[in-house]
Amino acid sequence: MSERTYDVLAEDAHKPIKMWTRGVTVEDAAAKQLRNVASLPFVGPHVAAMPDVHWGMGATVGSVIPTSGAIVPAAVGVDIGCGMCASLTNLTASDLPDSLIGVRTAIEAAVPHGRTDNGRENDLGTWRGNPPPQVVEAIAELREGLDKVVETRPALGRAARRMPSHAGTLGTGNHFIEVCLDESDRVWVMLHSGSRGIGNAIGQLFIELAKEDMRRWFINLPDQDLAYIPDGSEHFGPYLKALNWAQKFARTNRELMMAATLRAIGEALGRPVDGTAMAVNCHHNYVSKERHFGKELWLTRKGAVSAKEGELGIIPGSMGARSYIVRGKGNRDSFMSCSHGAGRAMSRAEAKRRFTLEDHAAATAGVECRKDAEVIDETPGAYKDIDAVMAAQAGLVDIVHTLRQVVCVKG
């Protein structure tokens, strides 16, 4: 029998919490969140914690939460369907110029990202005018499903009207687009984003509806953010419909940005760029119905990636750190899951206090990226050691490719 690769945080009155965190620090706040989740009566047979686990809004980032008969909207979060996309291109390092500022500028021009000039929260990286034809076509395909979602919950109407300006756009924070080189100096494009404003609106609405029901039913919870929607209740069907649509939008959003990025790189280099040799597009903030331990379960992966046997996934490091294309081992105890990245080692505020611009420049040496005060909270030191994270989950995935960034566009 093989050696067990996880530790158990708590059993007692809770369901077990199986943790792939050997060699990685787990903050007390995250451990408390995991215990709170494991205490819910509809959670089980256990909760799985990935090595990038850290405190998050609603539920612990880096956790896999199996439920029967209910879903916790705040555990899914407000960036529904957030995930990664990566494509191996027909380029090698020798095809890239010595200075990559032109490549970075081309990507930034092709994919709306970050804040607009006035810095308004509702103008984050949206199209200023008509989106390109490829985006317009995708919007038309998405519209019918979104209209059905709005029929059930008209409160989503405003966000739905703004959806076309967000399709094919990156967002802010830890969302990014990168050009990377693998161990053979082949060029990859990798990006991270989700369902943008419409996913946020869906998440916020149903989180509040779940909380209202908890108050109405006099249900006491260890954390109000664990308010849940029971199967068969008024909001369950509409939430599932909205959730599934947002996950589809997020996947489509990444596909649109990948295509735009490849075109932009091609224009910058003056040659066509193909990204079909190997392509991966995976969620890491989502819900799916899966069979585990002989039972149909709702599986919420909150900052975790599906790692079924043979399935490809993406585990990014931070700016300036390695990233990985991995193949799942189908580990049953982890619900066939792995980490979604390195995981934050500290809050954004703490990172801004602790690191200087000089620290950030040194940590991202050799990467064409922003090196200003606005990205200090995303500097590599704000994240856990990706090597320790990968070592802790050696029983969950095999490494297929190791990538190093040469260009990074931050949201």
Image (cartoon, rainbow, N blue to C red):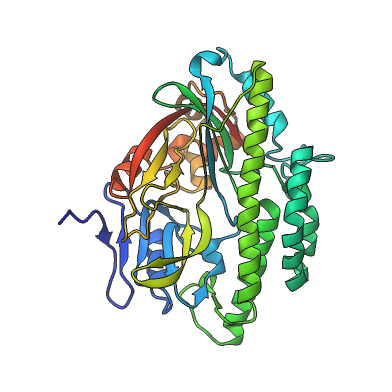
Occupied quadrant, residue 150: bottom right
Q: Is residue 70 left or right of residue 244?
A: left
Percent coordinates x, y for residue 42 in the rendering: 43, 77
Image vertical order of residue 214 relative to residue 103, above or below: below
Compared with residue 213, is residue 123 higher up or lower down, i.e. above or below? above
Return the x and y of residue 110 as percentages of the image width and height. 71, 31
Q: Residue furthest right?
A: 129
The quadrant of the rendering that contains the N terminus is bottom left
Q: Does residue 36 appear in this view?
A: no
> Which of the 4 quarters of the picture holds residue 168?
top right
Where is residue 207? Give x, y as percent.
61, 69
Splitting the image into 4 quarters, where does residue 54 fall?
bottom left
Asked whether residue 236 appears in the rendered view, the answer is: yes
Q: Quadrant of the C terminus?
A: top right
Front position in the image: 293 or 17: 293
Question: Relative to 12, does residue 343 appear above or below in the rendering?
Answer: above
